[in-house]
Amino acid sequence: MPKMSGAQALLESLERQNVDTIFGILGGAILPVYDALYDNKKIRHVLARHEQCAAHEAEGYARASGRAGVCLATSGPGATNLVTGIANAYLDSSPIIAITGQIPTCGVNSSYMIGRDAFQEADIMGITTAITKYNYQPRTVSEIPQIVTNAFHIATTGRPGPVLIDLPKNVQSNIDQVKFTDKHNIRSYKTPQPPDPIKVNQAANLLAKAERPILLIGGGAIAAGASDEIIKISDLLMAPVTTTFMGKGAFPENHPLSLGSIGMHGNPAANRLISEADVLLAIGTRLSDRATTNLDTFAKDAQKIQIDIDAAEINKNIEVDIAIVADAKVSLKMLLTAISEKLKKGEGKAWTKRAKEVKEQLSPLLKENPHDLVPKALLSELRKLLPQNGIITTEVGQNQMWSALYMQALQPRTFISSGGLGTMGFGFPAAIGAKVACPDRMVVDIAGDGSFIMSEQELACSVMEDIPVIVIVLNNSVLGMVAQWQRTLYDRRYNAINLGKTPDFVKLAEAYGAQGIRVDSIDKFKNAVKTAMSSKVTTVIDVPIGSETDVVPFVPPGYGLPQQRGDY
Amino acid sequence: MESEKTKVISVLVENKPGVLHSVANLFRRRNFNIESITVGATQQQDIARMTITVNADEKTLDQVVKQVAKQIDTLTVEELEQGNFVMRELALIKVKITSSKERSDVINFVNVFRGRIIDVSTDSITVEITGGPDKIDAFLNLMITFGVLELARTGITALSRGAKSIRIDE
């Protein structure tokens, strides 16, 4: 058995998991790991400018690639700064490994030990219990390889999620014999079971007989890589397909059967048709409040089938008739075979015709005015310029909901946004992470002025580390989504939403060594996007838009999906 | 809305630090109401048994069981079937004594309830009593008439009836 330090054991264990990049910021309690990185030739370290962004970058990397992303921070404030990023990954079920330094378990100076409130000590194990899938604190060097193997196994299997490894400084620097292993050994961890054939058969019966079937796809379908099976099932049943916000990209939104996403700011056709369906097949979705809007009226005429890898999601928000607790891809393959045996291929269903009608009547994509500098037109133009495999990230707020409505996602893992936690400032670092994972693809962050300034300092990271992405700031000079709520639900009593004309985003970009372009027409916008796409440096495109533009339609809190408001 | 009932869940978990924290934290976060929780060793050294008593309707209980099962360190979760398990709770009760008549009254009650006297002073008696929660409540109500100086209850611990057992293979 080789002898090495805990820090070297950590890095070699990460290499064995094929980690090629770590996003992080150093500090006192993680110095031994950074010292070991000095000699490491295989792992690239990307220096973030804030730990929260390091976690978002790791998540962007994970969601674009499907592999676990890794972030690294020091103890105390380094670790607590990661917390929002870890919580974001937890709520969106993204596999990230967060590694934190911790003050020593013992040492020469016994007042500098875990549990005595030493300098930069934070109980990150306690703090992250509720927002990680699991967390570890190795107490000896020899434990490290097994813990890293287990951590990656937990993060990437079943319902993916973040795992934290808190590494005391003395464990990083101690030297001991180390045995590496690629075998996880967690007897209590329940790996997914194959689908119950009886349930699959029941689901197939229901779907084969359905007159008005609809598919609702969540982020779990993307994690499972189930897009091909979803396309086949919808084609077989001629069933329209809608996604949750997190499911965007699981089904190509330019497919004739695509209805776009449902929800509070969902696509009107999707919100309408899900309420008319007689059988709903929900795949990899927790049926959250933002997707269902009102639990009592959600798809109330439909018999419901739910496929989820997480047993705890069954009947949590919506009671279902048939539940399949298993991997979505495996389940859908079985379901596909079972349906094709039962289905009588007949004449085109009235339901398909109805779906087409509703879609034509209600689709916001068809009503665009190509000349106004409005989000609808801007995003439609962006879609035309961006390659199919181009990756879109978004910030949070109006920019995000406009992206949901108007920016078609055509492939899985090309639409990356903070769905569950709704973290402003997520999109830009996520774009950086996605670009590192997929350096040959275009990556665009659709931002608002409010969100972008929450992680604007990562411009330094993208410039210095040579990670060129495109940021489109839909700049309305207000915190737009809350302004919209104050406008519509609080009688226009605007408070604390005005951002003014500061900063000047062009100068801001230039200050960091990035490229800044301001546009005042659709044509200039198109040119700016083209310039940005051929640029070797990150480009910020500042697009001034009206400050009173609403995201419509809008389902007010408490109302059902079809009760959407607004002129769309 | 379905009525709430007291349910007993028996959970086998890895016997290591942090497990109680993560389960207790889960209950707090999901707004599940714990009546009592007891944790202790099992016949297998590396496994601990948690006996959790919750007040919940069927839907909430379903979520409790699933969420506890989802914890990485959970080996098995079992809802103990109503009437098909044995449960005990232990209470230590320190009772105020002001006369020799009171002392003999308390001793009589202790005998009736098959409790044990584990400490006596000139003006107090400390009683150990085990049984189901109903029995302990009944005894406690009697003691309140004398004056309860201190009370410590362990919460319920329970096992299913018969030879059926959960064993975790190494």
Image (cartoon, helix red, strand yellow):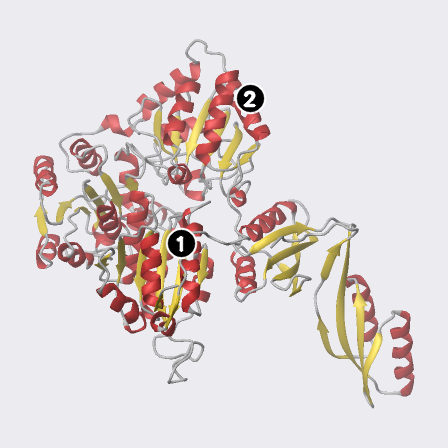
Q: Do the residues under discs 2 and 1 have CB atoms within 8 angstroms?
A: no
Percent of width and height locating residue A12: 32, 59
Q: Residue at 54% of width from left, 57% of height from top?
A: B73
Hey, what amino acid is under mark 2? Asn
Check residue A463 in the rendering and tell me which mark sits there, or answer none.
Answer: none
Q: Secondary structure at mark 2?
A: helix
Position above or below: B3 against A554: below
Alpha carbon of mark 2 to alpha carbon of mark 1: how far? 37 Å
Percent of width and height locating residue B64: 59, 51
Quick one: A162 or B147, which is closer to the camera?
A162
Position above or below: A407 against A360: below
Quarter of the image where one finds residue A260: top left
Q: Chain of mark 2?
A: A
Q: Residue at 59% of width from left, 28% of height from top?
A: A198
Quick one: A54 or A501, which is closer to the camera?
A54
Percent of width and height locating residue B87: 76, 59
Check residue A205 in the rendering and tell me which mark sits there, or answer none.
Answer: 2
Quarter of the image where one finds residue A416: top left
State left or right for residue A30 relative to residue A166: left
**Residue that mark 1 sits on:** A162
State left or right for residue A213 relative to residue A376: right
Quick one: A277 or A337, which is closer to the camera?
A337
Residue B29 visible in the picture: yes
Q: Quadrant of the C terminus of chain A?
A: top left
Q: Secondary structure at mark 1?
A: loop
Percent of width and height locating residue A549: 24, 42
Q: Residue at 57% of width from left, 48% of height from top?
A: B66
Sequence-first disc among 2 and 1: 1
**How many residues crowd mark 2 within 10 Å: few (<14), some (14–19), many (20+)?**
some
Residue A424 visible in the picture: no
Q: Chain of mark 1?
A: A
Position above or below: A371 against A517: above
